[in-house]
Amino acid sequence: MAHFLTRVLKELCESFLRVLLLLIVVVFRSCQVFCLRVLRAERRKDVSGETVLITGASRGIGRCLALEFAKHGACTIILWGRDEEKLSSVKKEVEEIGKTVCHFYRCDVGDREQVYRTMQKVQENVGKITILVNNAGVVHGGALLETKDDNIEDTLRVNTLSHFWTTKSVLPSMLSNGRGHVVGIASTLGLFALPGVSDYVTSKFSVVGFYESLAAELRAQGRRDVGVTCVCPGHTTTDMFKDLTTQSFSLTPQQVAEQTVDAVKNNQRRVILPRIMHFTWILNSWLPGSWMRTVLYVTGAMKDMENFCAKR
Amino acid sequence: MGFVELSLLIWRVICAWVSALAHVFLPARRKSVEGDICVITGAGMGIGRLFALEFAKLGATVVLWDVDNPANEETARLVEAAHGKAKAYVCDVSNKSDVYRIAEQVRREVGDVSILVNNAGVVCGKTLLELPDEGIEKTFAVNTLAHFWTVKAFLPGMLANSHGHIISIASIAGHYGGVGLCDYSASKFGAVGFEECLRYEIRRTEKQGIYTTAAYPWIISTGMFEGFSPKEGWLLPPLEPQHAVDCIMHGILTNREVVFVPGILNFFTFLKPVLPMDAMWAVVKFFGIDTAMDTFKGRNKQD
């Protein structure tokens, strides 16, 4: 009996110490991150001299990202998109900024084989990619029961699975060079849901999960030289969500691009834009489900989504 | 937002909180599922089989879906041995035309489905670079897209009868990304997002009587995650299948929207959005999740 008691006590003590240690580490880390953020003293890396690949670069956030990376002195920028005319005009804009070399390739990221083929072409013609920005995305939307099956599959292929294919094809060279960064443009709809866009929400939740796993995986392997950033912008004034007539907290694609490049430099893993959306996320996970619905009704977001849905 | 709206919002938040708190202390009444027709996907093994037995015990007719016919028939036999009503169908939920066809067949042969348990799931358990492309696509087809197809097949009937319950068995990996779980976590995150959307979509129709329950269990020792070896079992032990099913059943019968098993996982959900990812990593390491998949074996494929 005494033996049993001592054993239980010992185990309790041991785990108690481990829990205590955990709490100390958690508090310390939180303070550290907070202080670094406030003092803006994160270790910043340079993006000049990098080879950047941006998917969905013909317009919206992708276009602004290309220009922003060029402004920060990226050495080569590769644009992927489906519309060659628009891509070539973005290429011109990028080349006007400075000495950045710009290439563009027609590629539908929803098609796995096409991604692999184009990636091979890029690696042969241009070289190894050191920053990958998975930005391409589509939205079909509409009431769940009226959304077409093909549209649901298309959304998931383009918004989610494409990240797997592109990342799988560039990660080996990043790991062997000991240098690289994978950036995913998700959405705040990847953190909390809204009605009327179930295909989009599902795909963006998956994207957030993918980058979280990828970051954990690289970290578990001790690879701090390859960074992972997941950007979750709120409503952005691009063509994609032009049917959404919301008034509050809209971002311009330029703002998203600036913050994204900043996050890459700081090696930030999770970026939520605008900041207030982080607060919404916290409340969404802290409060009972009916709260979020109430907020949506009161702030009129439900009505906005209703209108958006009706236009689909 | 004007003053009136703001005060209304605060009032409703308080109401929601109070009713949520009341549910913690007051035991909720369990509803009856007698006479309901309940479709369970992935009913051939693991917790799918246990759900079938539980629903049958409560007087529901269970419709069993699985790709593995012998295992599915075995479940049907077990249910019938326990004096329940069961009917087994071979259905690959990753194939949407299969889902729609068999859903129609169920409607003709058994009747209007009022409970749907989206339980089928697969896992590859490899690091991103080792994952086969087909494996990734399969994981998404079964863990995420299948929820769209089954819901689209059965929700209209539930709406027409103003009676129904959709249950999705996701995973705690749908809230936290894990090492060696790139495809699985991503697909389960998707299922979580879909479930959240579904709640809004049902609410929007303003039909009463249709409920949803999302279950987020920690690892259940059914063999699906054979070899997954986390640490600190005293705090988060792997769940016994029957215990997990009991907890989730209780959530379903009391119309809970979200059920974490074990309940302590609620606490980590509170932490996630407020802790920086560096601090969360300490928690991940504490539970040994960074190395848990190293010894992963998974279910041995018989076919």
Image (cartoon, coloured by chain):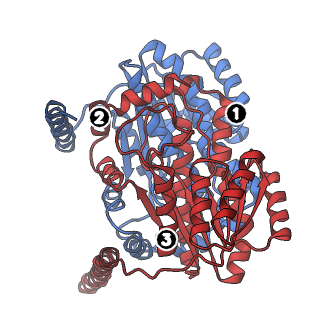
- Is residue A301 depicted above or below B283 in this figure? above
Q: Colour of chain A?
A: red
Report the front residue among A302 and A7. Answer: A302
Q: Chain of mark 2?
A: A
Q: Quadrant of the C terminus of chain A?
A: top right
* Kind of residue at badge 1: Cys
Q: Chain of mark 3?
A: B
* Kind of residue at badge 2: Thr
Q: Is residue B283 visible?
A: yes
* Kind of residue at badge 3: Ile
Q: What x and y, as percent, mark residue A106?
A: 79, 51
Q: Residues within 10 Å of mark 1 (few under 14, many from 20)?
A: many
Mark 3 vs mark 2: give the one in front.
2
Report the front residue among A283 and B180. Answer: A283
Rendered residue at 27%/46% (across/down): A287
A297 relative position to A255: left or right: left
Find disc 3 in the rendering and name its residue: B289
Question: What distance separates the C-alpha of mark 2 from that of mark 1?
Answer: 43 Å
Q: Share a chain, discs 2 and 1?
A: no
Q: Quadrant of residue A91?
A: bottom right
Find disc 1 in the rendering and name its residue: B91
- The answer to whether mark 2 and mark 1 are in CB contact below 8 A is no
Residue at the extreme front? A96
Q: Is residue B50 visible?
A: no
Q: Quadrant of residue A305?
A: top left
Q: Quadrant of residue A150?
A: top right
Q: Chain of mark 1?
A: B
Rendered residue at 28%/84% (across/down): A17
Q: What x and y, as percent, mark residue B229?
A: 52, 71
Of the two numbered discs 1 and 3 on the same chain, state the one appearing first in sequence: 1
Element on which disc 2 rests = helix
Q: Share a chain, discs 3 and 2?
A: no
